[in-house]
Every structure is written in C-alpha cells, then in structure tokens.
Image (cartoon, helix red, strand yellow):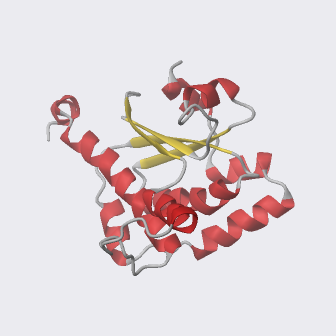
Amino acid sequence: MNLYDEWSKGLAYKDFLARYGKPNDLTRWQKNFDQTVLNQGQIHLLVGFKRQMPVLCLAGAWCGDCANQCPIFARFAEATPTIELRFLDRDDHADVQKTLQINGGNRIPVVVFFSEDGFEVARYGERSLAQYRDMAQRVEGAVCATGINIASDPLPVRIMQDWLDEFERAQIILRLSSRLRQKHRD
C-alpha cells in the first residue's frame, strides 16, 4: 500500500471533524484544541521548518486519545505552512488501519510523516512516551526508582513536547536528506 496516496485522500482537521464528529466528540476536540497553547520557543521551532512535510494522521473522532492528541497536531500545522496535515478515519480506511497496526493491534492516533515527493520519513503513535510513563506508573508504580524521570511539567505539556519532538525529528531528517538538499540546492 502506498500511504502517500492515502494521504492525498485525507481530510483537513476541520473537515475530518465535520464529517465524523458527533456533538460530544466535537466538544472534546474543541476543548483540547482551545487548551493547546504553544509557547514562543515551540512556535519559533515550527516557524523555522524549511521542508514541506505532508503528515497523515489515522484517527477516530470518537477516540479519547485522538481527542487529546490530534488538536496538538492541528496547532503545529497552524504555526507553519510546511506541515500539510491530513486525517483519515480508522473505520473508513481498514486497509490503512491494518498497515499501521502497532504491536499487532489497531491503535490510533498514528501519524506518518512524508517528504514533499511522497517518501515515508517516519511513523509515530499511538501515545507519547510521557503518556506511557504516566500509565506505567499508575499500573506498576514508579517507572524509574532512581528518580531520574521525575517530570515537573503537567502531563499534557509533556505529551505535546513529545509530539513536537517527533515532528522536529521528521523535519530534521528531511532537512538533512542529501536528495532534498540537492534538489533545493541548500
């Protein structure tokens, strides 16, 4: 399956929600969107992105993890024209869902980053490391008994930073690509 072809079928953030969201879903997504505020350093980083980066997000408007995380992606895309964010509904795109399974399961959200000419650069999902650490601590106790992983920022802030790190990682891969550097003569 060519996932870049699937990206071209994806919907913009608002169009995705308009098509798939029910009133309760829309309320949750909007609340999280309103609460997602980028700081000046994060905005500066995103504005500095040089390469066009199509981004596919497999999601479900009904999904709590998606409602919590996908508005973050929309905020990133607002900050820079280089992020071309598109959404596919997991249930309407079972073939994509199967291709993007994590650990043998149907998980969302899953994000796929592409180069401007359709090569896959990276994948990331369904939850960030900060979120998994938080979940593990609740299930198993302290993740790191030495105290090294003690976080001072609230969980939503850490989740947003984890995702920003992944967007930045993909952008750096694109920026350092010898193929794209040659193409853009930079």
The foreground one among 147 and 67 is 147
Relative to 65, 156 lies left or right: left
The extreme top residue here reads 1
Q: Looking at the figure, which quarter contains the C terminus? A: top left
Q: Position of residue 83 (x, y in %)?
A: 44, 49
At a point 64% along the width and 36% down the height, the residue shown is 106
13 vs 100: above or below: below
The foreground one among 101 and 71 is 101
105 vs 98: above or below: below
Relative to 35, 176 lies left or right: left
Relative to 93, 150 lies left or right: left
Q: Position of residue 180 (x, y in %)?
A: 23, 33
Q: Position of residue 37 (x, y in %)?
A: 50, 75
Q: Position of residue 119 (x, y in %)?
A: 37, 27
At a point 28% along the width and 59% down the height, the residue shown is 48
67 vs 90: above or below: below
Query: Picture quarter containing residue 94?
Result: top right
